[in-house]
Image (spheres, rainbow, N blue to C red):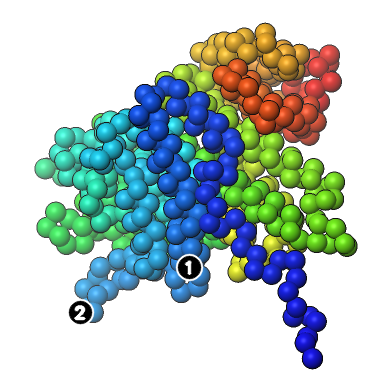
Amino acid sequence: MDNPGLAPYDISGYQGIRGKNYFELDPVLLRLTESHSRSLSGVHARAMQDHLRGFGKLASETLDELVEACHKEGRYGEIVHYNRTGERIDEVRYSTEQKLVRKLAYDYGLVNLDFHPNWPHEFTFFHKMAMAYLANFNGESGYTCPLAMTDGMILALKEIGSEEQKKMYLPLIAHPGSDSHFMCGQYVTERVGGSNVAANRTVAVEMPDGSYRLNGEKWFCSNPGDLWVTTARLPSNTIGLFLVSRLKRDGTLNGCRLLRKKDIIGTRGKITVETVYEDCEAQALGRVGHGLANLLRYVIKTSRLHVAVSALGMARRAILEARAYVNVREAYGRRVVDYPVVRRALAVMEIRQAALTVLCFWNYELNAKSDPLALLLTPLLKLASTVHASRTTHEAILLLGGNGILHDFSILPRLHNDSIINETWEGTHQIIAEHALKAFERPAVQRSLERFREEVVAESSSRALLLEMSAAAKGILQGDRSEQMDHRLSIAQFLTDFTALIALERELRSGPSEYLAMVRDGHCELALRAPQISSANSVFRRPELSVLF
């Protein structure tokens, strides 16, 4: 007799969205790619679109399967301290699957397409970050955090590296044919503080040949590999920025001792370690006395830009997985998607995702043009995108019910853990919100924001709300400084909603879109009801604006 409990049911053979081209599944990215293409020649635009479509296919098929395979117990990276003859090597060894993931992404040009001889066009910032976005549909994957650090390293070498450093290291980390696939790291955090880099206790002493010797420790060393940036205190009591290679020029191991792997809850595909420097050879990167400024300008800023888009990539995958599941799953005689509360939950996630994605890619455009508004949007988006990703992955897990908490059923638990890690990278919420508030107080930032607001307000269907939000923004600037700091997170949420509305209106001005128009209208509704805004009402000091809160 057949066992009725083992008969096929509604999710038999369920695969989620694996194998469906990520690029083609994303209406916002498709629209933004179309908009960006207008600034390119026809040949360049078609080449970029084909390249993104090709990566969307690669990521949804081969990379998705490999990433799943290397995120299982026994397949994570490990530290090998000694070789067979007892010599210290402190080498990180990854599984075959993880090494192949890195190689495929590196060879596709995710961070180094401008070094590929067969790519005859400019490698635009939009193109690079669109690929980073698609890469994170698979979670951190073991390489998207290293990708960000490698991108920062390439930028730092280009901008402040010596000619000798460029000649020595750019072929290693960027050129096709290199076998160092995203093996650049950041060794900044110490036990005495993460964001408070000025409290570093590692010391640097200059040698007669102009190199430095470092002694100290680093508590979070992300992606130990071939080359990394690090910080250390100079005799002048300032913080310097340095380049460190795993091996000395003579091929022997440098004075960096890997102690142990950190047992962190997410981003486990690439390992994070603790280290001790013992007369570790290093080179100054840029003017040695400008270490903190250069760290922020080239390394931290690049990481924050990547963190925002990586969070949005993870959130987008979560929404797609949740939608795919509730469309086939049944409960109490109905498809789960047919319940109004489920449709509303999906709609809210979709609206927030689309609004933040449009804002994020507008920020990349502003960064490329060095517009002052980017000084505000970069920290805002690091905060808002990571909070959105953690919330969205959590909601998606709940929509899958019991299956949502199973690591071997879907990617959602790993996406959620990776999203939480993203919230902590490059500054916690309170610190990032403070950076955003300080940027907002700059006159140049205010002028830029007002200019963009004026450009869209006349023809906008959300004209009344834009005017009220603009007035509220001015009210923030007139408020008490200590009260502003107490409500910095609420203010950051308000500024995100305000700038996202401007970004949506700007995109709609470039061409009609029924989808983005609905997103714009939904975003206005959510902004009006946001509890984060209402809790900060006293800061705005404008009772007549109570309708907003």
| Rendered image quadrant of residue 520 | top right
Q: SS for tag 2?
A: loop
Q: Is residue 73 above or below residue 525?
A: below
Q: Is residue 343 above or below residue 13?
A: above
Q: 408 or 158, which lies in front?
A: 408
Q: Position of residue 110 (x, y in %)?
A: 38, 44
Could you tell me how many numbered marks the image carries? 2
At 64% from the left and 54% from the top, the residue drawn is: 321
Q: Nearer the viewer, mark 1 or mark 2?
A: 1
**Residue corresponding to mark 2:** 85
* Mark 1 / mark 2, whichever is N-terminal: 1
Q: Is residue 332 left or right of residue 262?
A: right
Taking 203 as reference, is 200 left or right? right
Image point (85%, 50%), residue name: 339
Q: At 35% across and 48% down in the image, what residue appears?
A: 108
The Cα atoms of the two marked residues, 1 and 2, are separated by 32 Å
377 shown above or below 164: above
Label 1: which residue?
Answer: 69
Residue occupying the point 25% across, 68% down:
89
The answer to the question of whether label 1 and label 2 lie on touching residues, with beta carbons closer than 8 A, is no
Q: Nearer the viewer, residue 112 or 307?
A: 112
Q: In which quadrant of the rendered image does the C terminus lie?
A: top right
Residue 189 showing in the rendered view: no
Q: Amino acid at mark 2?
A: Thr
Residue 307 numbered tag: none
Q: Position of residue 547 (x, y in %)?
A: 84, 20
In this rendering, does residue 350 appear at all? yes
> Residue 353's quadrant in the figure?
top right
**Amino acid type, callout 1:** Ala
